[in-house]
Image: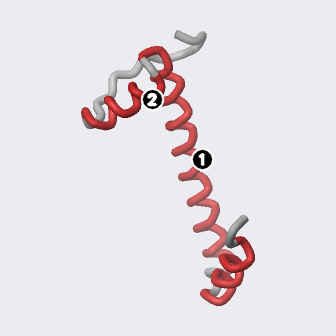
């Protein structure tokens, strides 16, 4: 266990656990879960930031979203 690490006990659906273990192996599970937790925290922070921008500046128009999707298509 990494220095400063805390051991957690979690429950996940059996099929998800099997799929992850198959992909990362028995020794890669902690690293995979750590990356997944960090990723989810980043997504939540980004969502809060976008909500804050929407509140301050207003929502992005449907036209602007469509233009952005067209510009980024295939990239």
Pointer 2 local density, CA inside 10 Å: few below 14, some 14–19, many at least 20: few
Residue occupying the point 64% across, 84% down: 66
Label 2 residue SS:
helix
- Residue that mark 2 sits on: 23
Quadrant assignment, res 75: bottom right
User: Which residue, given by chain and number where applicable, does mark 1 sit on?
Assistant: 42
Q: Secondary structure at mark 1?
A: helix
**Crowding near the residue tagged with mark 1, few <14, some 14–19, many ≥20 C-alpha atoms within 10 Å:** few
Residue 31 at x, y percent in the picture: 53, 24
- Name the residue rendered at 39%, 21% in the picture: 8
User: Above or below — where is 39 with respect to 65?
Assistant: above
Q: Residue furthest bottom?
A: 63
6 or 12, which lies in front?
12
Quadrant assignment, res 23: top left
Q: Residue at x 62, y 81 (%)?
A: 59
Q: Position of residue 30 (x, y in %)?
A: 48, 22
Callout 1–callout 2 Cβ contact below 8 Å? no
């Amino acid at each position: 266990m990494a220095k400063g690490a805390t051991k957690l006990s979690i429950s996940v659906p059996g099929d998800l656990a099997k799929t992850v273990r198959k992909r990362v192996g028995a020794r890669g599970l902690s690293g995979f879960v750590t990356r997944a937790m960090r990723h989810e925290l980043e997504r939540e922070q980004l969502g809060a930031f976008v909500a804050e921008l929407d509140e301050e500046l207003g929502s992005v128009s449907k036209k602007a979203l469509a233009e952005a999707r067209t510009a980024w298509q295939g990239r």
